[in-house]
Amino acid sequence: VQLQASGGGLVQAGDSLRLSCAASGRTFSNYAMGWFRQSPGKEREFVASISRSGGSTSYGDSVKGRFTISRDNAKNTVYLQMDSVKPEDTAVYYCAARYSLDRAYTPTQIYSIEFWGQGTQVTVSS
């Protein structure tokens, strides 16, 4: 599956931003989807994931209560709504996909990801 992330940019602390990831090439509803991020000098970390049905979600501790992941299987798109952003949210955000037979599965580990998007830069100024 090909993944194209968009929506990144420069925002101020406390602002909101919505990232989108459009998928193509395979049946989108067969894939659990996720967002990961990576800052310079740091390892890629888990942000959020959503099951293929959209009924289950998982979040990294640093974004719980501020970020919301959702998906629209009719549009082959997954979203990441980022509210109350902080300077420490600055990173390149990567969309990710994992084929799953389990409708409730939400990937949280890098090694579980099969497909990655190209990344979109999010910069939060203080």
Image (tube, rainbow, N blue to C red):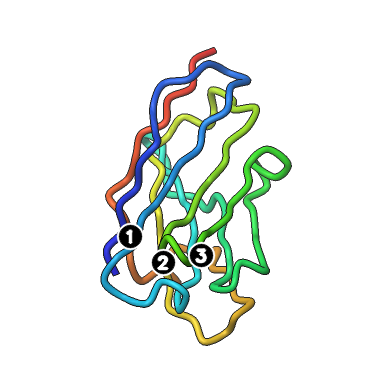
* Vertical comparison of 112 with 75: above or below: below
- The secondary structure type at the circle numbered 2 is strand
Q: CA distance from mark 3 to mark 1?
A: 13 Å
Residue 107 point in image, percent of width and height: 54, 68
Q: Which residue matches tag 2?
A: 97
Q: Which mark is residue 86?
A: none
On-image quarter of the N terminus: bottom left
Name above or below for residue 110 compared with residue 100.
above
Label 3 vs 1, first from the N-terminus = 3
Amino acid type of the residue tagged 1 in the rendering: Trp
Nearest to viewer (mark 3 / mark 1) = 1
Q: Residues within 10 Å of mark 2 (few under 14, many from 20)?
A: many
Mark 2 to mark 1: distance in Å?
7 Å
56 or 75, which is in the foreground? 75
Q: Vertically, is 17 above or below 44? A: above
Query: Which residue is at 59% across, 75% downward?
Result: 105
Residue 91 in the image, given as x and y percentages of width and height: 42, 35
Q: Residue furthest bottom?
A: 101
Q: Upstream in the sequence, badge 2 or badge 3?
A: 2
Kind of element beneath mark 3? loop
Q: Which residue is mark 3?
A: 109
Q: Looking at the picture, which amino acid does disc 2 mark?
A: Ala
Circle 1 — which element? strand
- Counting residues from the start of the chain, the first of labels 2 and 1 encountered is 2
Badge 1: few (under 14), some or many (20 or more) residues near its Cα, within 10 Å? some
How crowded is the residue under tag 3: few (<14 C-alpha within 10 Å), some, or many (20+)? few
Left or right: residue 103 versus residue 6 is right
Q: In the image, what residue occupies the spot 46% across and 29% down? A: 90
In the picture as drawn, the residue positioned furthest to the right comes out as 65
**Furthest-top residue in this view:** 126
Residue at figure coordinates x 57%, y 28% from the top left: 16
